[in-house]
Image: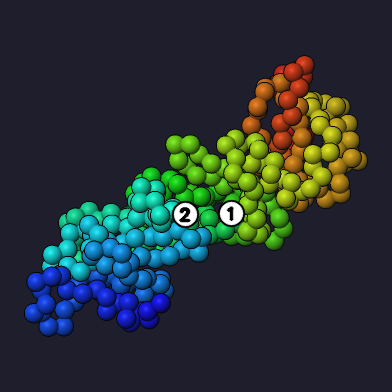
Amino acid sequence: MLSPKKQRALILPRQGRTDLANYTAAGHLLWDALVNTSLTPRIDETSAGRAIAIDLPDGTTLWLTEDADVTHLPTDHEAWSALHFHDPADSGDYLQVYLGPGDLSCEADTAACVSTVAAWIASWTAAGAVARHNTYLTLNKTAAPRDTIRAAWHISWGHPGFNPTNPTSPTEQHTATVIEQSADLPGRRGACLACPWEGPLRRDHNSAVEDALDHTHPGWRSLPVVPQGTGGKNAKRIRAYLEAVYPTGWFETGGPLKVYTNVANDRHEPGKARGGGYLVKVYRSNYTPEPKHQQQSLL
């Protein structure tokens, strides 16, 4: 493979512009800005206009051009486009990462394109709930298309570690959470706030929560289920029962509490168990909860 310097030199003048001395193309400005952002571009020699490509660790590719060309003069520049090809052999399988508005100077459009591409690559290659969420917040401040931002993974609203504006920090102990894509068909994964672990892709909320609990609190599935709410002497009795049958320190480490519900597919609730863990709903058709005015929290 050619050195970066020789790769850059492939951005040649357009046909008919060979009389220009010290020719600087718009692509030269884009190339230099990418390198200065610690990205590694290459010239795609299969494209007529020497498009700039960035190869990602998972074998996918970003393509940066203006109508498949980067050799035009900065004064002739209109707008950069950045496309992510999921399969480099399939030109129809791509995601629009950036598209310039068409009213910026070459320098301004280049800066906006590179900052967006850098933020998107960080989000795409991130692993784990904390890294995913924090790179998503950065991407959300760029000029990336709305659908592209919605496709980026981030911590689900209301789940441990979620913050709509500020970066989240890793926890010292394994803590269950859920990450999602806010697309038309959202995907979800169980995740952990202490490590990069992520569960399999799920379509439903409860499965993702349960995957995360398998990681952070193995053995939770075999623990007993209790009524969701009760009052008076029963509350004390059930609290004593939980302390006797649940492992020591279980709730202090964010362990889940399993409770009955008469609602099929009732959503597990983050932060509702004693200690801030998940309230896991277990369906039982003949379960009748106490009236709300008689319920006393066990949490």
Q: Residue at x 44, y 53 (%)?
A: 86
Q: Residue at x 51, y 60 (%)?
A: 58
Name, please, the residue furthest toward the right: 244
Q: Earlier in the sequence, mark 1 or mark 2?
A: 1
Residue 276 visible in image: no
- Amino acid on which disc 2 is placed: Tyr
In the structure shown, which secondary structural element does the residue marked by tag 1 occupy?
Answer: helix
User: On the image, numbered disc 2 is attached to which residue?
Assistant: 136
**Residue in the foreground of this view, choosing between 65 and 206:** 65
Residue 53 visible in image: yes
Q: CA distance from mark 1 to mark 2?
A: 10 Å
The answer to whether 274 is drawn above or below residue 61 in the figure is: above
Crowding near the residue tagged with mark 2, few <14, some 14–19, many ≥20 C-alpha atoms within 10 Å = many
Question: Residue 176: horizontal and vertical position, in percent?
Answer: 67, 49
In the structure shown, which secondary structural element does the residue marked by tag 2 occupy?
Answer: helix
Question: Residue 15: horizontal and vertical position, in percent?
Answer: 13, 70
**In the image, is 138 to the left or to the right of 108?**
right
The answer to whether 231 is drawn above or below residue 156 in the figure is: above
Crowding near the residue tagged with mark 1, few <14, some 14–19, many ≥20 C-alpha atoms within 10 Å = many
User: On the image, numbered disc 1 is attached to which residue?
Assistant: 129
- Amino acid on which disc 1 is placed: Ala
- Residue 115 is drawn in which quadrant? bottom left
- Residue 119 is drawn in which quadrant? bottom left
